[in-house]
Each structure stands twice: as C-alpha cells, then as structure tokens.
Image: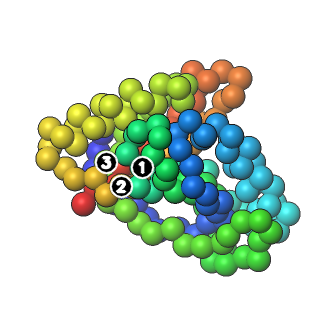
Amino acid sequence: MIIKETQPFNALTFTTQATLPELSKYGPVGQKLCSEAERLGIQPGGLLQWNYYEIDGKPETVFTLEIALPVHEKEAEVQGFESKPIPAIKCLSLVHEGPWENLPQSYGKAMGYLSANDLTMTGECREIYATIDLEETANNITEIQIGIN
C-alpha cells in the first residue's frame, strides 16, 4: 500500500445512482464506453475505472457510481455518455489480484491501514482495471484507490 496523488485526466463517463448489490448490472457499460470512443475515433488515454462517491460499504446505501474511460481529447460530442475532466485525488493505493468477489478483503486491509495510520477518507474510491479476465477471474488485476485528506 502506498499513499500517492493521482493525475487529472479527461474521460468519457457514465454516471448513475446505485447500491452495492446493483453493481453487476453495470458491467457492460465499460464496453459501451469503449465502443463509443471507437465510433468517435477517440484514442483511450488509460485504463477503464469505476469511481465511487459517498460510498460507505453498506449494501443499502445509495451512492454515485461513475464509470470512466480516460481519453486524450478534452471534450467530445458523445451519445449517451458525458465527456468531462476527472480531478486528481490524494489516495491510499493498493493492488488487488484475483476475482472481484474478493475485493471486500482488500478493502478490509485498506481500512485497517487507514485506521492504524489515523488517515481520514474523503468518501471517494476508485477501481482501475489493469487486467480484466472474465474467463479466468484469478488473473484480474485491480488497483484500488481510496481518497484521503
């Protein structure tokens, strides 16, 4: 685990209100963002990520989910999505290797680190998908970024 500051970037985004049990239904959105970028001739500028705002880990809590595909263009005329800047954040960063069903264990380790080091969360978390393998989920590599003050 490390503490770092991310770089701001431009992205094609999809934003909605969701709860943790609803997240699986948004899985196809990433591919739709990639298809929209391809349709527009926009080159991706980074890895697909899911950004969570005002999330507290409780299944019933409604939070803002933003699925973002970093792109090089500052603005684009997109259909069904938004083109916008994503700000930098200071965060605790850790890498989760394996199935996404095991993400709660990695978040638990991060929460322990935050508590032990007296760090305060901002309510923003990001998951950056370095490797997505839907057939062999043990191959998935996800960077977790937990916003801190």
In space, the residues marked 3 and 1 are separated at their CA atoms by 16 Å
**Which residue bears the numbered disc 2?**
123
Q: Residue at x 31, y 58 (%)?
A: 122
Of mark 1 and mark 2, the one earlier in the sequence is 1
Residue type at mark 3 is Leu
**Which residue bears the numbered disc 3?**
92
Residue 71 percent across, percent down from the top left = 64, 65
Residue 44 percent across, percent down from the top left = 68, 60
Mark 3 vs mark 2: give the one in front.
2
Of mark 3 and mark 2, the one earlier in the sequence is 3
Q: Are marks 3 and 2 in contact (CB under 8 Å)?
A: no
Q: Residue at x 72, y 76 (%)?
A: 76
Q: Are marks 1 and 2 in contact (CB under 8 Å)?
A: yes
Task: Judge the density around disc 1: few (<14), some (14-19), many (≥20) Cα neighbours within 10 Å.
Answer: many
The local secondary structure at tag 2 comes to: strand
Q: Nearer the viewer, residue 58 or 77?
A: 58
Of mark 3 and mark 1, the one earlier in the sequence is 1
In space, the residues marked 3 and 2 are separated at their CA atoms by 12 Å
Residue 105 percent across, percent down from the top left = 38, 26
The local secondary structure at tag 1 comes to: loop
In space, the residues marked 1 and 2 are separated at their CA atoms by 6 Å
Q: Residue at x 69, y 49 (%)?
A: 30
